[in-house]
Amino acid sequence: MTSTPRPVRREPGSTSLAAVKIPRPLVDQMVEHAREDLPNECCGMVGGRDGVARTIHRARNARASPFSYDLDSKDLIRNYNEITDTGDELIGIYHSHTKSAAEPSQTDINLAAYPDAVYVIVSLADSENPEIRGWWLRDGKVDEERLEFD
Ligand SMILES: [Zn+2]
């Protein structure tokens, strides 16, 4: 897919210096999206800079599936442009898990295409208490990122 925008590369090692911060109102937007798209998984993108999220951009789940997601390619490009037009970077990709924990599935790991974006998973397994965790998915490897909500 040659039209897929490439994320801006960070300086080597910079991702491990600090937690990724996601202000509470943005967390609420992702949870709201996850609930609206039930029974399917939702997905979208997170814009920001210096490890701090500033905007949430919904994308259609091209698979419309309860078990996996694929960012609609038109939404992907539109969102990417919206994010970078403000001088921000694509810092995260989010999606929901409707019944399983906020841990990447093998499919998530296999299909992860953005080594410089943190993969945020919103789990609605406990519908009253959504769980949100962040992951780096690179070359088939999985590393958890500490997310800070404030
Ligand atoms: Zn997943």
Image (cartoon, rainbow, N blue to C red):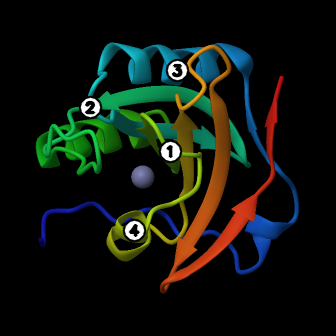
Look at the image and tell me in which quarter the N terminus lies: bottom left
The percent coordinates of residue 93 (x first, y second) are 46, 48
- Of the image marks 3 and 4, the number of the one nearer the N terminus: 3
Judge by depth and name the residue closer to the eye, 70 or 101: 101
At label 4, the amino acid type is Ala
Q: Position of 16 compared to 83: left or right?
A: right
The percent coordinates of residue 88 (x first, y second) are 54, 41
Mark 2 — residue? Answer: 40
- Check mark 4 vs ligand 1: CB closer than 8 Å? yes or no: no
| Badge 2 density bin: few <14, some 14–19, many ≥20, Cα 10 Å | many
Cα separation, mark 3 vs mark 1, equals 15 Å
At label 2, the amino acid type is Asn
The percent coordinates of residue 71 (x first, y second) are 24, 47
Q: Secondary structure at mark 4?
A: loop
Which-is-in-front pick, marks 2 and 1?
1
- Of the image marks 3 and 2, the number of the one nearer the N terminus: 3
Give the label on residue 31, or none: 3
Mark 1 — residue? Answer: 100
| Badge 3 density bin: few <14, some 14–19, many ≥20, Cα 10 Å | many
